[in-house]
Amino acid sequence: MVLWFKTVHDYDFNFETATLAFFNKYPNPYASHVESVDTVDRQVIDGKLHTTRLIRKRGKLPRWVKPFLGKISHSWIVEKTVLDPQTKEMTAYQRNLDHTRIIRVEEYTTFRYEEPENMTRVSYRVKFSSGFKGFGVKNRIEAWSHSRFQENIKNTRLGMAYVMQQCKEGQR
């Protein structure tokens, strides 16, 4: 079984502020689990900014997962973005690089400027899939990841709004 999570959020900030905040969202008080962010590639192709970053996160796992992962408490994420300043749209793709046999999380995010409202609409689609062979454990891992993401999206929104406000005030 594969689970999907979808949500949309509108930020009362223009596209430039929202995307600047995206690239500068760490550190922020709502993302203390992010240990590092490294830009490994950035180039302009056909007028669009392409960026690849590596993100290291730590997290708390439920006890029932620890027999499968051991004492591992961190994960590496790859993030690829394409920002088009002409259409005022940015797409981002993130996925975990490790523990993919246990759980693979793929996040597709779109930032789109809404002209008359002068706001940025952010759409999230997240796919949770486990390669685990035990059917009951597989479903449980996917369901736990899905529910955890639903809880964490609140902090994502708060963190982004915090950084957007800092960008607007010239503090970032």
Image (cartoon, helix red, strand yellow):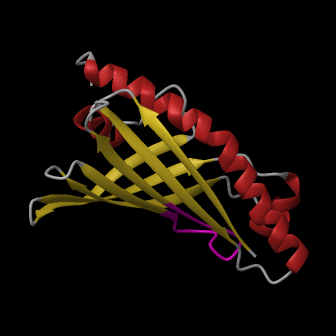
Q: Which residues are magenta?
A: 95-107
Query: In which quarter of the view is residue 44 placed?
Result: bottom left
Q: Residue at x 34, y 57 (%)?
A: 91
Residue 109 horizontal side relative to residue 2, left or right = left
Q: Name the outermost residue toward the front.
A: 116
Q: Residue at x 61, y 35 (%)?
A: 154
Q: Residue at x 28, y 24 (%)?
A: 167
Residue 134 horizontal side relative to residue 38, left or right = right
Query: In which quarter of the view is residue 24 placed?
Result: top left
Q: Quadrant of the C terminus?
A: top left
Q: Residue at x 33, y 20 (%)?
A: 166
In front here: 19 or 119?
A: 119
Compared with 110, 67 (above or below) is below
Query: In which quarter of the view is residue 102 placed?
Result: bottom right
Q: Position of residue 138 (x, y in %)?
A: 81, 73
Q: Name the outermost residue toward the left.
A: 46
Q: Position of residue 45 (x, y in %)?
A: 12, 66
Q: Is residue 27 visible?
A: no
Q: Position of residue 170 (x, y in %)?
A: 22, 18
Q: Position of residue 2 (x, y in %)?
A: 70, 73
Compared with 24, 148 (above or below) is below
Residue 52 horizontal side relative to residue 132, left or right = left
In front here: 9 or 21?
A: 9
Compared with 149, 105 (above or below) is below
Say how many tags the image has: 0
Q: Quadrant of the N terminus?
A: bottom right
Compared with 12, 94 (above or below) is below
Q: Is residue 102 magenta?
A: yes
Q: Is residue 165 magenta?
A: no
Residue 107 horizontal side relative to residue 12, left or right = right
